[in-house]
Structures are given as C-alpha cells and as structure tokens.
C-alpha cells in the first residue's frame, strides 16, 4: 500500500479507530513517550506502571534491541530486505531508517492491524531514494494476504529478515507457532528471524501484575518461557545467532541507546509517572527489571 493507496477514506478510518478501549500500539506509544494515543491508552499505561513502576524499561529496551538487531542483520548478515509485522506507531528510528544507514538500498515492508498505525503510516513511507518501503494494513493471522502484498516490494528469492518484535505475546499458541512456521518456510536460505517476547521466567511477580492490568482490558497477553521462545527458531530449522535467547538488555549491548529528552528537574517534579517516561534514562537497567527475551536466528 504505497503512495495514494494510503489515502484511506477518512470516515472509514475514523469508524475503525476505537477510542473507548486501550490498544496495544497506542499503549506502547505512551510508554515510549509518544503522542499518538488517547486518554484510554494513557490510563492503561498508568495502570501498567502502577503495577510495575520500572516496566518502561521492558518497552524501551525492547525497542533498543530492535535497533541493535536490525543493525546486526544488515551489517553482519548482509540483509537488505525486512518484513516487519507488528510495526507499531512510527518513532524517530523505524526499521528502514536503521537499515538504510547501513545499506541505503534496503527495502522494508511494514505490517500492522491497528487503524491508528495506518493513519500514521505515511511517516513509514520515507525511504531513501535507493531503497523502498511499503505498508500493509493486515493481521498477522492472515499471512497469505501479507505475503501476497509483500511480494510487490520484496524479492523472496533473496534473504529477508522477518521481524516479529513484541507482537507474539498478543497471539495464542494455536496461531503463533503455525503462522511463524509458514512465514519462515517462505523465506530462502540466509534469511533471518528477529524476535522479542515477554516472559514470566525472569521477574514473574512484576510481569504478572502488568499482565493483569492488560487482560482486564481485554488484551491477549501470552507470556512464554525461554523454551517456548526458542521453539520459534528450533522448530523451524533456524540456527540461533550468538548469544541465543537472552533478556533484552544482554543482547549485544552497545551503549548507543538514544539519550532521553532532557528537562529541568523542577518541571520533571510536576509530571506524573506516564509523562515522566520520555525523560527517563534506561542505562540504569538491572536483571531485576527486564521481562523480555530476545534473539535472532538464521535459516541455513
Ligand atoms: C508492542 S507493539 C511493538 C511495536 C514494534 N514491533 C516494537 O517492538 O517496537 C505491538 C504491535 O503489534 C501490533 N499487533 C498486535 N497484534 C497484531 C496482529 N494480530 N496483527 C498485526 N499487528 C498486530 C500492534 O498493533 C502493535 O503495533
């Protein structure tokens, strides 16, 4: 869906945007310090932060894993094509901006099922002149539709990185495992899987408290163990890259996470927990904070 095809009927788009219920993309945007969200999403983020005041570290370190992993598969794996399913709302550093810094001709297809992401998708179609980006308004559970549209931009005879970062906890096992298998099966040798996933292996009490705040709001919120996360790789014939499945902040840390916005301490003191998030440094993370497993793997 490029160029004018993004020009949705505004009335139809408005009809699809439900501002009475929190939505994953928008709550995640709140916790990243973004502005593309509604009061109901802020309330959900506030509830999650009340349940786990350091929970913003899961979100911010997950996003920083995405930066490091896309950089690694582009720089070391030579990947020039990305299929990013569960893209989220545009931020300053989207997959194409990260990848095209390394390979200016990188092609990226973004996929999300949230109408607010669609409404902001033009910010994702800002490829450099040598590369290309596209946006598909589709559900992960409709992989046939995704692949049919993705071939317009990606060449599936050449390696592709399938990016499934912080999406699979919204999908039950019955869909998650077979759909990832089907997607990996379509990729040629040399392709990569870039994956992150919430878990209760690490700090169970904190993440279960957060899980409750989301399930109360009707979210599917499946926490998976290390073995269950590894299955997405091993069951599909993928070889895990070093360092394997690890907590997000342990995956090839490079100390280059974007610095937070700065603010006067007197102003900061006036902010609530949600508004403060964008000003918080994430470098004070400890093992007691993180509930996200991450990994990349290669198709031999
Ligand atoms: C937590 S955000 C992660 C965004 C981004 N991948 C990142 O990690 O920074 C999850 C995204 O997955 C999307 N999502 C959830 N379920 C989906 C589904 N069934 N199909 C497509 N997108 C989905 C949400 O709309 C949201 O944008």
Image: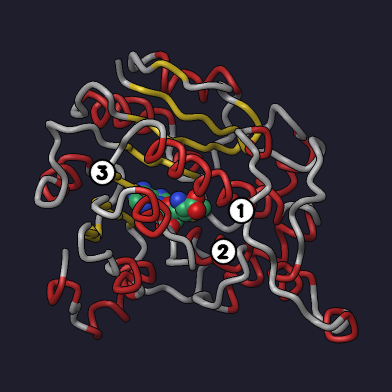
Mark 3 is surrounded, within 10 Å at the Cα level, by few (under 14), some (14 to 19) or many (20 or more) other residues, namely many
Disc number for residue 81? 3
Circle 2 sits on which residue? 27
Which of discs 3 and 1 lies nearer the camera? The answer is: 3
Instruction: Give the distance between the C-alpha atoms of the residues marked 1 and 2, in whole angstroms.
Output: 10 Å
Percent x, y for residue 162? 33, 37
Tell me which residue sits at (32%, 37%) in the image: 161
Residue 140 placement, left or right of 48: left
Tell me which residue sits at (23%, 52%) in the image: 105
Circle 1 sits on which residue? 214
Which of discs 2 and 3 lies nearer the camera? The answer is: 3
Classify mark 3: helix, strand or loop. Answer: strand
Q: Quarter-wise, where is residue 246 in the image? A: top right
Mark closest to the chain's N terminus, 2 or 3: 2
Q: Disc 2, ligand 1: is the CB inside 8 Å?
A: yes
User: Who is closer to the viewer here, 77 or 111?
Assistant: 77
């Amino acid at each position: 869906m490029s160029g004018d095809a993004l020009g949705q009927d505004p009335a139809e788009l408005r009809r699809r945007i439900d501002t009475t219920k929190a939505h994953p993309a928008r709550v995640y945007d709140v916790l990243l310090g973004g502005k593309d969200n509604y009061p109901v999403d802020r309330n959900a983020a506030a509830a999650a932060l009340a349940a786990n005041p350091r929970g913003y570290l899961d979100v911010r370190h997950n996003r920083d894993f995405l930066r490091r992993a896309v950089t690694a598969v582009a720089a070391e794996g030579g990947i020039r094509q990305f299929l990013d399913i569960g893209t989220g709302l545009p931020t300053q550093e989207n997959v194409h901006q990260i990848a095209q810094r390394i390979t200016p001709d990188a092609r990226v297809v973004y996929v999300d099922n949230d109408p607010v992401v669609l409404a902001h998708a033009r910010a994702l179609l800002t490829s450099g002149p040598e590369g290309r980006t596209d946006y598909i308004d589709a559900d992960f559970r409709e992989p046939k539709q995704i692949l049919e549209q993705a071939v317009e931009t990606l060449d599936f005879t050449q390696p592709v990185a399938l990016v499934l970062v912080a999406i699979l906890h919204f999908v039950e096992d019955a869909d998650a495992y077979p759909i990832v298998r089907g997607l990996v099966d379509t990729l040629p040798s040399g392709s990569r899987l870039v994956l992150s996933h919430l878990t209760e292996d690490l700090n169970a009490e904190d993440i279960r408290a957060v899980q409750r705040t989301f399930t109360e709001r009707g979210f599917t919120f499946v926490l998976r163990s290390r073995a269950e996360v590894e299955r997405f790789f091993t069951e599909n014939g993928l070889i895990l890259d070093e360092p394997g499945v690890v907590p997000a902040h342990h995956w090839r840390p490079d100390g280059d996470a974007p610095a937070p916005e700065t603010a006067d301490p007197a102003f900061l003191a006036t902010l609530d927990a949600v508004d403060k998030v964008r000003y918080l440094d994430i470098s004070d993370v400890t093992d007691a904070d993180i509930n996200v497993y991450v990994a990349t793997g290669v198709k031999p």
